[in-house]
Amino acid sequence: MSESSIFEKVLFVGMDYKIPKGGIASVLNTYSIFIHPFKFVRTAASELNNVQKVWYAVSGYLLLIWKLFTDRKIEIVHIHSASGTSFWRKNYAIKIAKMMGKKVVFHCHGGGFKEFRLSNIKKVDVILAKVDCVVCLSGEWNNYFQSIGCKHIVTIKNVIREPNIENVEKNGVVHFLFLGLICDSKGIFNVLKAIGDHKQELQNRIVLHIGGNGETDRLLSIIKELGIETLVRFEGWVDKEKKQYLLNLADVYILPSFIEGVPISILEAESYHKPVITTNVGGIPSIVQDCVSGVFVTPGNDKEIYLAMKMMAESEELRQKYGEASYRISRDYQPEAIKKELIGCYDKILKTSNIRIG
C-alpha cells in the first residue's frame, strides 16, 4: 500500500498546530509538512481563556463528527493527548470515533501520565480500554503501559525538523539555552538559583537565554531579586525564526526537569549539535547519554546544575565532543524515519482488535 493511500485513512486530532506552542503542537506541525494528505481536527489551542477552550473543544467535536461522516476513507483516528484536562477532552473524541466504527490510536505525550493515572485509575483505564493502540515515545514508556495491562503498544519517536544551521556572532561568552514552559517542574528556577549563587564566578563568562511562556512574572522577579540581569536574558515566547537563531547561538542546551516524556526541545537542540544538561527522568535517557552527549544532574540540585554549567563553560573541546554525539542521536528522529514508524503502526492497527486493560 502506498504512503498516500495509508494516510488517506488517517484523521489526526489534537492541539492547533498552526502556531506550534508546546510539544504536541510542534509534533503535529512537523507531521503536517511530511504527511500527505494530512487530515486534521483541532480540539484545543494554547493561551485560550475558559470560554474559548470550551468553544474550541465543542466545535472540534462537531467537526470530527462531520469529517467522519463525510470522508468515508477515514478508518483510523489518531488522537494526540497529554494528561490532565487534555486527556479528559480527548475522551469525547475517542467516544465519537468508536461510535462511528473507527479504529483509535491514543498517542500519549508529556511526562505526567503516571501520576495522573494514579489519581484516576478506574476512569483512565476505562478510557484506555476503548482504544485500539497506545502510542508512546520511548521504551521506558512502552514498559509502563505494558505494566498497566495495555496489550497493543507501539513506540514512535517524537519527530523534529531538519536543522537550519548558520553561523552567528557569540561575543566571547558561552551561551546556555532553555526553551519551554516556565514552571517549577522544568527546573528553570533551580537554574536561576545556581547562577545566582555563583554570579561572581560566572560574570562575563556565560549568558543564559530563556524562551517560553508560563510563570514569566515570577521569572523576571527572581532574576531581579538575585541580581543576575547581566547573566540571564528572557526572550519571551520564540517563533520559528527566533528559535532557529537561538539554537544556532547556543553552546549548551539546559532542561533540568523533574518530570518529562521525550522533550522535543532536547531533540531540536541535539539536531543543532548542542550538548545537553538535563535529568535522568521519563524518556530522557533514550535521547541523552550521560557523559557522552550531555550531563545528567539530580532534579532540584542547584549545586550539580552549577557544576555541570561550569564544566561545559570551561571546555570547548567537551562541548564539541558531546555536541557531535547529540547530533548522531537526533538523526533517528528525522521525518523519514518517523514516517516509516507511523505507516507500520497504521498497517498493524487495521489488522488487530482492541487493546484491553487487565
Image (cartoon, helix red, strand yellow):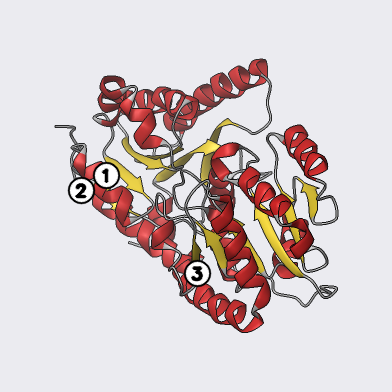
For this orientation, the residue located farthest to the left is 358
Question: For mark 3, does the 10 Å Cα neighbourhood hold few (<14), some (14 to 19), or many (20 or more) residues?
Answer: many
Q: Relative to 133, does residue 297 appear above or below in the rendering?
A: below
Q: Quadrant of residue 245?
A: bottom right
Q: Which residue is mark 1?
A: 144
Q: Relative to 181, does residue 327 appear above or below in the rendering?
A: below
Q: Quadrant of residue 338?
A: bottom left
| Disc 2 residue type (three-letter) | Lys
Disc 1 versus disc 3: distance between alpha carbons?
24 Å
Helix, strand or loop status at disc 1:
helix
Which of discs 1 and 3 lies nearer the camera? The answer is 1
Q: Is residue 137 left or right of residue 14?
A: left
For this orientation, the residue located farthest to the bottom is 317
Q: Which residue is mark 3?
A: 330
Helix, strand or loop status at disc 2:
loop
- Residue 263 visible here: yes
| Disc 3 residue type (three-letter) | Ser
| Disc 1 residue type (three-letter) | Tyr
Taking depth in this image into account, of 258 and 249 the one nearest to the observer is 258
Question: For mark 1, does the 10 Å Cα neighbourhood hold few (<14), some (14 to 19), or many (20 or more) residues?
Answer: some
Disc 1 versus disc 2: distance between alpha carbons?
24 Å
- Looking at the rendered structure, the number of numbered marks drawn on it comes to 3
Q: Which residue is mark 2?
A: 351
